[in-house]
Amino acid sequence: MHRKQSLAQRLLCLPGKILSWLIVPLVLSIILAVVAAHRGWSTLIDWEGRIPILGSALTVNSLVDFQWYAFALIVLFGGVWTFFEDRHVTVDFMAVHMRSRTRAVIAILGDLFLLLPLCVLVVWYGTKFASVSWNTGEGSNQGGLIAHWLIKGALPVSFFLLGAGAVVHAVETALGLVRHPRTDTDTPDAR
């Protein structure tokens, strides 16, 4: 059963929904890399000068780098979307025997005291991690993509969105508790 998402939730999920479409070029790049490896091709296309992210050629290593870039983006930003769709890993075997208010209180505590601190740490250290990559111009030494800072920068951005999502979720859950005072019918779910 899905409930209507708030504007904040929809905005936080938007990058994950957009980046989920990377699955199509991801699959195509895997197929192309397999065909290129089978045919013995290492360079697919080359050109004069350098193009941002691609460098001076599109190689099999570029395809492999793109695959981990795409997969990382799908997972990182899809995690926020998954969180709000309530499709993330939970401890349901325990929660099924709890009252809905108890589950809500545990969700608030988990959001604020487990998820949010983790997100703050990843944003803090991830920003430094991406900054070092940017400052050193880190890229593939084997003819792959030349902007590792781009994917490393996605780490703190995605965890910032997830942390904001934790706050939004906790606030909305707390408001739900306030708006719906305890009733005698608040019993554990019968599944």
Image (cartoon, grey):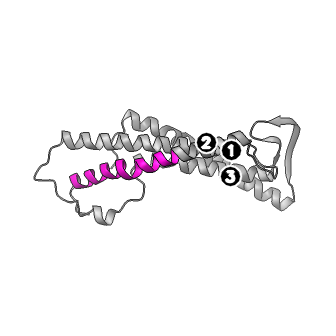
The residue to which callout 1 is attached is: 133
Q: In this rendering, would 27 be left or right of 16?
A: right
Q: In this rendering, would 178 be left or right of 93?
A: left
Within 10 Å of disc 1 (Cα), the crowding (few <14, some 14-19, many 20+) is some
Within 10 Å of disc 2 (Cα), the crowding (few <14, some 14-19, many 20+) is some
Residue at disc 3, secondary structure: helix
Quadrant of the snapshot with the C terminus = bottom left
Do tag 3 and tag 2 residues touch (Cβ < 8 Å)? no
Instruction: Spot the residue most to the top.
Output: 7
**Which amino acid, mark 1?**
Ser
Position of 41 relative to 123 (above/below): below
The mark that comes first in sequence, 1 or 2, is 1
Q: Residue at point 86% right, 50% down?
A: 43
The residue to which callout 3 is attached is: 67
Q: Is residue 77 shown to the viewer in this render?
A: no
The mark that comes first in sequence, 3 or 2, is 3
**Which amino acid, mark 2?**
Gly
Which marked residue is nearer to the observer: mark 1 or mark 2?
1
Q: In this rendering, would 85 be left or right of 140?
A: left
